[in-house]
Image: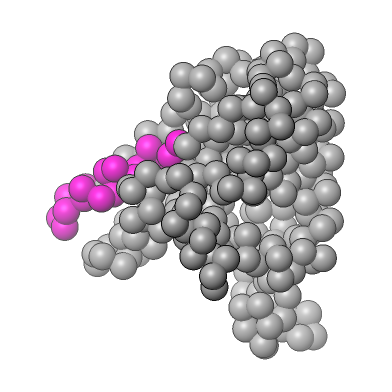
Amino acid sequence: MLRELFHFFVTPCPKTYRRLGYLSGLIAIQGRYKRVADHWRTHLDNSRQLILHAAAQTPQRNKVVVIGSGLLLDVPVEMLAKQFNTVILIDIAHLISVRLLCMRHSNITLVEHDITGLAEALLSYRRGESLPRPQAGLPAVAQNADLIISCNILSQLAITPAQYLQQHFVVDGERLANWRQEIIFNHLALLTEQPGQRVLLCDVFHDYLDRNDNLLYREDMLHGIKIGDPEQQWRWSIAPEGELDASYRLQATVSGFSNWSWP
């Protein structure tokens, strides 16, 4: 608990993002990783290897942009810093451990940015209004990348905004589901607009399994949006038994594309 409080108070993060719970969520991911690192190892290794494969296929290596750089667990950032002239890491906040690592490389730039464009609009939203429209966009420094990586973030983009609305307002279920789809679609449209090579890593399903590996429930993390047949696919043990509940575990299906385009 003290470690979490330390990161919460010392991590530079705009007040808007703090109020929406983004920083708390990032700190919680760090805590879970420390508890279940062995269960995440294969997923993290696969993610890093796919990114390096994409980097090797990128003809020009001036700039690489990572959207959803997080804790850099799934990003081979030091290799990217050697292979590209400029590395831009984009996330809602960057914890102290990430900042210290990146200080070793003069060509890495950390950018705090809301990739959905929803944060400010959510805090000013009032009951009865139309739900704010996602406005996915890259900061100027991240434009015209030779390689852009959407790193295990696609399925997560709508979670915090939807939770905020549900906590503060009564929103029709169908309306909220359509809004989640719009957020995901908006991010994919942003990727499509980029001129360079596009890596897409994302969890597409979450399976809740009992102690005998019987499927209790499958959650479609992309809410019906089809992204095509992946180049690679694997399972990620997000939360073993006891992490969320003693009676079940959570396992994701992850899809990876080294150069994604609309199917």
Say which quadrant the C terminus sits in.
top right
Residue 221 lies left or right of residue 123; in this view the side is right
Q: Position of residue 204 (x, y in %)?
A: 64, 54
Task: Indicate whether residue 203 is drawn in magenta.
Answer: no
Residue 166 lies left or right of residue 224; in this view the side is left
The answer to whether 163 is drawn above or below residue 256 in the figure is below
Q: Position of residue 174 (x, y in %)?
A: 35, 60
Can residue 48 be seen here? Answer: yes
Say which quadrant the N terminus sits in.
bottom right
Q: Where is residue 169, by image quadrant?
A: bottom left
Q: Residue at x 37, y 44 (%)?
A: 14
Q: Which one is nearer the viewer's eye here, 14 or 212? A: 14
The answer to whether 188 is drawn above or below residue 169 in the figure is above
Q: Main secondary structure of the magenta part?
A: loop
Q: Where is residue 227, by image quadrant?
A: top right
Task: Indicate whether residue 118 is drawn in magenta.
Answer: yes
Colour style of the rendered protein structure: one colour
Q: Residue at x 69, y 40 (%)?
A: 101
Q: Which one is nearer the viewer's eye here, 110 or 51? A: 110
Q: Position of residue 149 (x, y in %)?
A: 65, 33
Q: Residue at x 50, y 45 (%)?
A: 93
Q: Where is residue 29, by image quadrant?
A: bottom right
Can residue 228 be seen here? Answer: no
Q: Position of residue 211 (x, y in %)?
A: 76, 86
Residue 171 lies left or right of residue 155; in this view the side is left
- Magenta span covers which residues? 113-130
The answer to whether 167 is drawn above or below residue 128 in the figure is below
Q: Residue at x 48, y 52 (%)?
A: 10
Label tally: 0
The answer to whether 108 is drawn above or below residue 233 in the figure is above
